[in-house]
Image: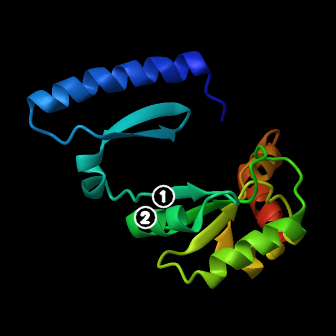
């Protein structure tokens, strides 16, 4: 999903207004933006746990070991390993990605590592999963469902082509 800069700016203004209200009621001021169903939801961090949400941090091949360890210590779910600094849905050199994932695996992090960005078919899914706890398919999955007349069948066919 693409969010325009103007829309994000408006949401950030709303977030600041909400923070002022929360301060008056003694709530923790830090907030988190959550994009769900095409809508940006602002959730006070004090309510993350009570809503059953986890902190998921993104890491890239450029993330330093020190920062990786810090994010791993703060995460309550998994680390989202962005396969490269390129955009989602684009092609990647998975040999370079495998080296990056091997580095993460050798760090013995406390959280599972799931790989995303560029995972689009059985080959990239298996390659990403070789050195991680799994892979996240986004753009390719959305494209597979885009013009579907039978969503359930399209999902089944897509999953069958991957696993």
Depth check: give the residue in front, 116 or 29.
29
Residue 3 lies, with reference to residue 47, above or below; the image says above
Determine which residue is flagged by label 2.
Answer: 75
Residue 88 lies, with reference to residue 29, above or below; the image says below
Snapshot quadrant of residue 160: bottom right
Which residue is located at x 31 percent, y 24 percent? 16
71 left or right, relative to 52: right
Q: Label 2 vs label 1: CA separation? A: 6 Å
Q: Position of residue 11 (x, y in %)?
A: 44, 23
Q: Position of residue 63 (x, y in %)?
A: 62, 59
Q: Position of residue 142 (x, y in %)?
A: 75, 46
Determine which residue is flagged by label 1.
Answer: 56
Q: In this orientation, does residue 112 appear?
A: yes
Label 2 element class:
loop
Q: In this orientation, does residue 163 appear?
A: no
Q: Which mark is residue 132?
A: none
Residue 76 lies, with reference to residue 24, above or below; the image says below
Snapshot quadrant of residue 127: bottom right
Mark sitting earlier along the chain (2/1) = 1
Which residue is located at x 76 percent, y 52 percent? 141
Label pair 2/1, CB-CB below 8 angstroms: yes
Q: In the rendered view, how is the structure colored?
A: rainbow
Taking the view exactly as shown, the residue that stands out farthest to the left is 25
Location of the N terminus (image quadrant) = top right
56 left or right, relative to 133: left
Which residue is located at x 66 percent, y 31 percent? 2
């Amino acid at each position: 999903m693409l969010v325009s800069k103007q829309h994000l700016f408006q949401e950030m203004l709303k977030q600041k207004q909400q923070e002022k209200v929360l301060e008056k009621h003694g709530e923790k001021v830090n907030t988190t933006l959550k994009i769900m169903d095409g809508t940006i939801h602002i959730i006070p961090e004090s309510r993350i746990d009570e809503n059953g949400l986890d902190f998921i941090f993104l890491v890239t091949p450029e993330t330093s070991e020190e920062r990786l360890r810090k994010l791993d210590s703060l995460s309550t779910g998994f680390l989202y390993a962005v396969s490269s600094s390129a955009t989602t849905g684009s092609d990647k050199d998975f040999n370079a990605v495998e080296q990056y994932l091997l580095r993460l695996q050798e760090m013995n992090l406390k959280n599972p590592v799931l790989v995303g960005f560029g995972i689009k078919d059985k080959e990239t899914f298996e390659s990403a999963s070789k050195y991680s706890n799994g892979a996240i398919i986004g753009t390719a999955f959305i494209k597979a469902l885009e013009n579907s007349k039978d969503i359930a069948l399209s999902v089944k066919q897509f999953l069958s082509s991957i696993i």
